[in-house]
Amino acid sequence: MSGGGFHAIVGLPPRGSANHAEAVTVPSRALLIDAGWRVAVLGGGVAAAGLLLMPLAGFGWRAPAGALVGYAVIAALVLFGLAGHAPHRRFGLANAVTLIRAAGMALLIGILAEGVALAPAARWLMAIGGTAALLLDGVDGWAARKTGLSSSFGARFDMEIDALFVLVLAALVWRAGQAGGWVLTAGLMRYIFVLAGWLWPALAAPLPPSFRRKAICVIEIAVLLAALTPLLGPEAAACLCLAGLALLGYSFLADVVVLAAAARRRAPAVTT
């Protein structure tokens, strides 16, 4: 969660630096090539997993199709957003790690698209894969700082994958029958926050770094992963998800209060 939590949506600092300023320009040809081949290679991996492995696991054509469509959308957004990574000429290890996580999200989207009941073995596999993705999330920020390739693009890319991760996990928990449809609120909350920022510009202001925000984001993902496993029955999983949702709601509310107070301080005083 190097972006400071997945609801820090606007004015994000680049990975590894809170005050690094950079001009957004057209990405260089070298950057487009470096990003392009990585996107293509991982796209081939998603295609191979979808077309070869998913049928072996008993999934039909909807699973690979959903995975490929999901990855294609992510890949297009990555390539169109590369201007935010300029003036760097390399995609970088950190963004490559985030792209690997994005490919994993695409495969989970494919499983959701299949629309079948999730067997215990499949739930264990997804929970293990999700845990690996969560551990990788701690690598990309470190890699950006280590390689000196911090950028607003990298921070935003990492944050968007975090947000997608929560939404997909919430949908899987619901599909597995571990919680009701209300659990989707955990994944939709960030997008509701974005919409609220469009309606009330004060909520679109930059948020200061916050350990609370990052910690709760990690806890929410861990809660959803635990709820997905067959270790917990539906009642226990639902209670755990409800607690995670309450904690996440508190985090969003705390940021709303911070942004509203900042907006009041910036407002010009009314004189009579």
Image (tube, helix red, strand yellow):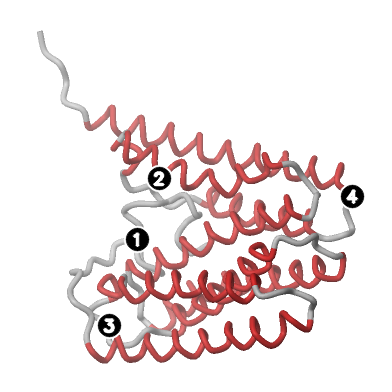
Seen in the image, is 142 located left or right of residue 173?
A: left
Which of label 1 and label 4 is nearer to you?
4
Marks 1 and 3, Cα distance to the nearest angstrom? 16 Å
Q: Distance between the residues labelled 2 and 3?
A: 28 Å
Question: Of marks 2 and 3, which one's residue comes earlier in the chain?
Answer: 3
Which residue is denoted by mark 2 in the rendering?
194
Foreground residue among 139 and 26: 26
Question: What's the mark number on residue 97?
Answer: none
Q: Residue at (46%, 41%) from the top-left corner?
A: 192
**Which residue is depicted at the point 49% across and 77% down?**
99
Residue 142 in the image, given as x and y percentages of width and height: 49, 75
Q: How far apart are marks 1 and 2 (CA)?
A: 17 Å
Q: Is mark 3 on a helix, strand or loop?
A: loop
- Determine the CA span between mark 4 and mark 2: 33 Å
Q: Which amino acid lies under the numbered mark 4 shown in the image of this protein? A: Gly
Question: Which residue is situated farthest in the left direction here?
Answer: 272
Q: Identity of the amino acid at label 1? A: Pro
x and y percentages locating residue 242 in the rendered image: 72, 39
Q: Residue at x 60, y 42 (%)?
A: 185
User: Residue under circle 3?
Assistant: 88
Name the residue: 64% across, 70% down: 62
Kindly report the distance in space between the C-alpha atoms of the residues bearing marks 4 and 3.
49 Å
Q: Which mark is residue 13?
A: 1
Q: Mark 4 points at which residue?
A: 233
Between 112 and 229, the residue placed more toward the observer is: 112
Amino acid, disc 3: His
